[in-house]
Image: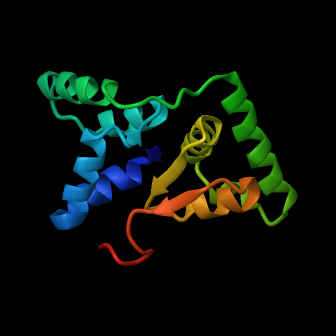
Amino acid sequence: MELADTSAWIWTHRAGGSLRAEFAERVVDGEIGTCDMVRLELLYGVRNPTESSAVRAELRALPDCPIGKRNWLRAIDVYDSLAQQGGLHQRSVGHADLLIAAAAEGAGATLLHYDEDFDRIAAVTGQPTRWIAPRGSLS
């Protein structure tokens, strides 16, 4: 299973075509998981209560990578490791991305994304990540 970051959801939707179809097939097959942080980010884009209910129901059906206290502590440890590199490296990644990465790592899932923040995080954690498409290929 792969935990799909919000960037993977958004970019596959924008790109359409075979990328979107393959992603949708993997969602249906239960190969794509999520976590509460991704759910919150995806719900930000809903336009009305009906859409919100529908999106929430769809997201509830996905495999879950929970974010518990252990994951919060891991995110903070990674943040600190980045800070130890100096040059304000810790500011090069978003807090939400740290939590999403910790959720994927804790669940033993590969992190599927289109966001270079996850390369910086994986450089510290060593966890598996995969770009949804080659970096820079989507616009």
In the rendered view, would you say 51 is above or below 134?
above
Q: Is residue 15 visible?
A: no
Q: Residue furthest bottom?
A: 137
Residue 61 or 48: which is nearer the viewer?
61
Q: Is residue 118 visible?
A: yes
Residue 125 at x, y = what percent?
73, 53
User: Left or right of 52: which side holds 34?
Assistant: right
How is the model colour-coded? rainbow
In the rendered view, would you say 119 is above or below 71?
below
Name the residue rendered at 71%, 62% in the picture.
123
Q: Which quadrant would residue 34 be assigned to in this image?
A: top left
Residue 7 at x, y = what percent?
39, 54
User: Left or right of 95: which side holds 28?
Assistant: left
Q: Residue furthest front?
A: 29
State the count of labels.
Answer: 0
Name the residue rendered at 74%, 47% in the picture.
79
User: Left or right of 16: which side holds 91?
Assistant: right
Image quadrant where one finds the C terminus = bottom left
Residue 98 at x, y = what percent?
62, 45
User: Left or right of 44: which side holds 98?
Assistant: right
Residue 124 at x, y = what percent?
75, 57
Name the residue rendered at 24%, 23% in the picture.
57
In the rendered view, would you say 93 is above or below 19?
above
Name the residue rendered at 40%, 32% in the picture.
40
